């Protein structure tokens, strides 16, 4: 591995406290760029080299999102090199970011969401686990990584809260609704300690901490059982959580806190989904509506 890349990844992991998954993503993207440079050391590359790399990605028919993601990783790398005085100037500053269309998040209405989270059968231990996972996802708006990262010490059923670790390992407290509390209590009361220790809340059938991929497969199984046409993922449950809160009168700042968004602009993507609610309020409140 390139020595400067290694220093950068150490910085991301130790000082920025990024997850292993995030650090691995940065490593792959920057290594792609270094391989493209061939015999040119990254500290000697210029903005034209970066532009040529982006052109090559486009030629390979990479999506705009992939191109933007790789450019973002390269920018972070060169900002670090510039700040630490490994290079005299940052070549990525002269490279424009391609514009990408923002995809509207996929969400479900209340009835469909309720049908999905209550679909798992509670007659079987795995069904009890699946029901608890779905209820927690919908009750808290958690990301999949936050759900699978839950430890037993993070759960307080008396207070009705869980501690989630989001991006950058930033912690936040999330609320558990009554249904989520009941489903989680039922699961924890019948749960056996796994081989990775009792700290992990959600375990797979082998007793190890459940993986992100397994949660996605589980959600997909129940989506297929309900014959839902939309492409629904665990993240769609998070989108539904935010949309339903806004449609029922929650303010944007509160939803931002509940989702663990760093910037309000990230949360604003959900505001378009409240259009019908806004129309209803307008119709009932405006004298000439």
Image (tube, helix red, strand yellow):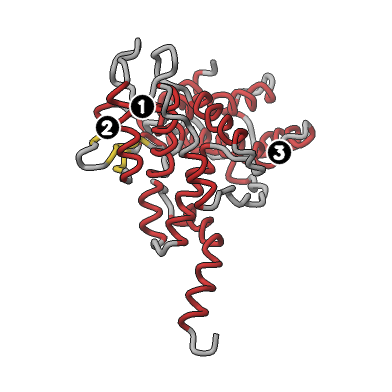
Mark 1 falls on what kind of element?
A: helix
From the image, state whether disc 3 or disc 2 is nearer to you: 2
Mark before the other along the chain sequence, 3 or 2: 3
Q: Nearer the viewer, residue 179 or 249?
A: 179
User: At x 35% / y 42%, what residue is drawn?
Assistant: 179
Tag 2, which secondary structure? helix
Image: 289 above or below 15: below
Q: Secondary structure at mark 3?
A: loop
| Residue 136 placement: quadrant | top left
Mark drawn on residue 63: 3
- The residues bearing labels 1 and 3 have C-alpha atoms spaced at a distance of 31 Å
The residue under label 1 is 14
How far apart are the two marked residues, 3 and 2, measured between alpha carbons?
38 Å
Find residue 143 and report its horizontal and vertical position in percent. Answer: 45, 38
Q: CA distance from mark 1 to mark 2?
A: 23 Å
**Residue at the limit of the structure toward the bottom, as seen here:** 288
Residue lying at the far right in this picture: please name it: 59
Crowdedness near tag 1: few (<14), some (14–19) or many (≥20) residues, C-alpha within 10 Å: few
| Residue that numbered label 2 is attached to | 154
What is the residue that sits farthest to the front in this orientation? 123
């Amino acid at each position: 591995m390139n020595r400067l890349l290694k220093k950068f990844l150490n910085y991301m992991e130790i000082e920025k406290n990024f997850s292993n998954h995030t650090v691995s993503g940065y490593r792959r993207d920057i290594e792609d760029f270094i391989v493209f440079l061939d015999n040119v050391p990254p500290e000697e590359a210029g903005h034209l080299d970066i532009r040529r790399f982006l052109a090559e990605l486009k030629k390979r028919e990479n999506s705009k999102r992939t191109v933007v993601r790789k450019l973002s990783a390269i920018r972070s790398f060169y900002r670090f090199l510039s700040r630490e005085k490994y290079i005299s100037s940052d070549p990525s500053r002269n490279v424009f970011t391609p514009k990408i269309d923002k995809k509207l998040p996929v969400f479900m209405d209340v009835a469909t969401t309720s049908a999905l989270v209550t679909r798992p059968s509670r007659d079987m231990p795995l069904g009890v686990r699946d029901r608890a996972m779905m209820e927690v996802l919908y009750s808290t708006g958690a990301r999949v990584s936050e759900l699978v990262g839950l430890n037993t010490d993070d759960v307080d059923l008396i207070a009705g809260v869980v501690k989630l670790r989001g991006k950058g390992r930033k912690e936040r407290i999330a609320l558990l609704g009554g249904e989520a509390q009941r489903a989680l209590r039922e699961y924890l009361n019948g749960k056996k300690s796994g081989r990775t220790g009792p700290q992990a809340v959600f375990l797979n059938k082998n007793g190890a901490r459940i993986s992100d991929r397994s949660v996605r497969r589980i959600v997909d199984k129940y989506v297929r059982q309900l014959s839902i046409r939309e492409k629904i993922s665990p993240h769609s449950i998070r989108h539904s959580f935010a949309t339903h809160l806004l449609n029922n009168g929650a303010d944007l700042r509160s939803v931002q806190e509940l989702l663990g968004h760093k910037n309000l602009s990230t949360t604003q993507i959900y505001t378009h989904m409240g259009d019908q609610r806004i129309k209803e309020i307008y119709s009932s409140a405006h004298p000439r509506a």
